[in-house]
């Protein structure tokens, strides 16, 4: 894979969703999640600064499990987007906002945890209980950064020239 490809954030996001997908599907089936049938994951583009009226800078998103939203117990996509907006606006994970800075909530914000911020990257998950949503978000972030760091290492080792052209 060429350096430009390895460092493309879109590829890193697709890779993270692909590798984390089987674990997310298994988490949906976790014993205390009997009523859950799907989870929605959204990854924001870390290069885009927050704008109050800006559209959500989605790098990638995917629904795992049941694709028919009419069978969902809640609108997981909308909740995941709300979690992502809170993280993008505050620079904090949704659990940190709820536990340490609830004054940062705005009208209409979800109060569920499951949005995570790590080194500028935001991933939000909705569809399970908050602990599993948050765990899955951390997993997606870990795979994203693994992909990006691998690309950086290839470039730094001069195996793959041309990234900065």
Image (cartoon, rainbow, N blue to C red):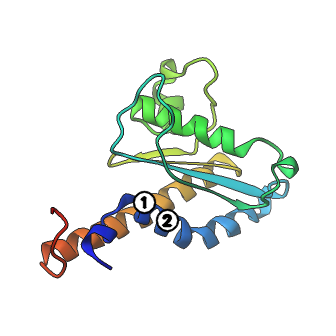
Give the residue at mark 1.
10
| Callout 2 crowding tier (Cα within 10 Å): few <14, some 14–19, many ≥20 | some
| 147 with respect to 42 (left or right) | left
Residue 80, given in percent of the width and then of the height, sits at 62, 43
How far from the left and from the top, in percent, is residue 60?
A: 52, 54
- Secondary element type, mark 1: helix
Q: Residue furthest front?
A: 165
**Quick check: 92 above or below 61?**
above
Disc 2 and disc 1 in contact, CB within 8 angstroms: yes
Q: Which mark is residue 14?
A: 2
The residue drawn where x is 60% and y is 68% is: 21
Q: Nearer the viewer, residue 128 or 13?
A: 13
| Residue 30 visible | yes
Vertical position of residue 1 compared to residue 68: above or below: below
Horizontal relation, residue 5 to residue 128: left or right: left
Quadrant in which the C terminus appears: bottom left
Crowdedness near tag 1: few (<14), some (14–19) or many (≥20) residues, C-alpha within 10 Å: some
In the picture, measured across the screen, residue 65 lies left or right of residue 101, that is right
* Most foreground residue, 23 or 58: 58
| Figure check: 90 above or below 48 | above
């Amino acid at each position: 894979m060429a350096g430009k490809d390895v460092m493309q954030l879109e590829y890193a996001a697709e890779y993270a969703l692909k590798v984390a997908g089987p674990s997310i599907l298994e988490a949906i089936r976790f014993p205390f999640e009997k009523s859950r049938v799907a989870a929605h994951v959204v990854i924001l583009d870390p290069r885009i600064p927050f704008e109050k009226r800006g559209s959500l800078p989605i790098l990638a998103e995917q629904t795992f499990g049941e694709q028919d939203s009419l069978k969902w117990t809640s609108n997981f996509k909308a909740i995941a987007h709300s979690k992502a907006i809170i993280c993008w606006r505050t620079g904090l994970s949704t659990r940190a906002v709820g536990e340490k800075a609830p004054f940062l909530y705005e009208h209409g914000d979800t109060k569920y945890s499951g949005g995570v911020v790590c080194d500028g990257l935001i991933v939000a998950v909705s569809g399970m209980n908050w602990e599993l949503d948050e765990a899955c978000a951390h997993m997606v972030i870990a795979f994203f950064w693994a992909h990006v760091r691998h690309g950086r290492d290839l470039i730094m080792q001069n195996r793959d020239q041309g990234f900065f052209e």
